[in-house]
Image: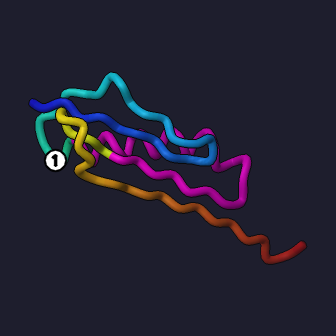
Amino acid sequence: MSRYYFDLHNGDGPLKDSLGVEIASRTGVIQEVAKIMLEIARDELPTTDRATISVTVRDADGEPISVSTLTFSNEWLKP
């Protein structure tokens, strides 16, 4: 198990994770990123036509090891 930190970047600005989560594998890290993004998307997407959500994962040493981005865009076809 290793501790990973998940920093959120969205329309509200960057939010740095100071607690982290103990996770056993890279697959677990990806699952945690997906969970975070789904929660943020559920809260933010119904209020906007465009949004970008990014999560930077840092290892126990504070070094970035992964960046994931979710982009949402809605275009109305009829006024």
Q: Is residue 51 magenta?
A: yes
Q: Residue at image x 47%, y 58%?
A: 70
Q: Residue at image x 64%, y 50%?
A: 45
Q: Residue 68 placed where, x, y %?
A: 37, 55
Quadrant in the picture for the C terminus: bottom right
In this image, 18 relative to 10: left or right? left
Q: Secondary structure at mark 1?
A: helix
Please say which color scheme the image uses.
Answer: rainbow
Res 72 → quadrant: bottom right
Looking at the image, the residue that sits furthest to the right is 79
Q: Residue 37 placed where, x, y %?
A: 45, 45
Location of residue 79 with respect to 62 vertically, above or below: below
Main SS of the magenta segment? helix
Q: How many marks?
A: 1
Q: Residue 10 placed where, x, y %?
A: 56, 47
In this image, 76 relative to 8: left or right? right
Q: Residue at image x 53%, y 62%?
A: 71
Location of residue 73 with respect to 64 vertically, above or below: below
Location of residue 18 with respect to 44 vertically, above or below: above
| Amino acid type assigned to the residue bearing label 1 in the image | Arg
Few, some or many residues within 10 Å of mark 1 (<14, 14–19, 20+)? few
Give the extent of the magenta segment: 29-56
Looking at the image, the residue that sits furthest to the top is 19
In this image, 7 relative to 76: left or right? left
In this image, 54 relative to 1: left or right? right
Residue of label 1 = 26
Q: Is residue 62 magenta?
A: no
Quadrant in the picture for the N terminus: top left
Q: Residue 36 placed where, x, y %?
A: 42, 40
Res 63 → quadrant: top left
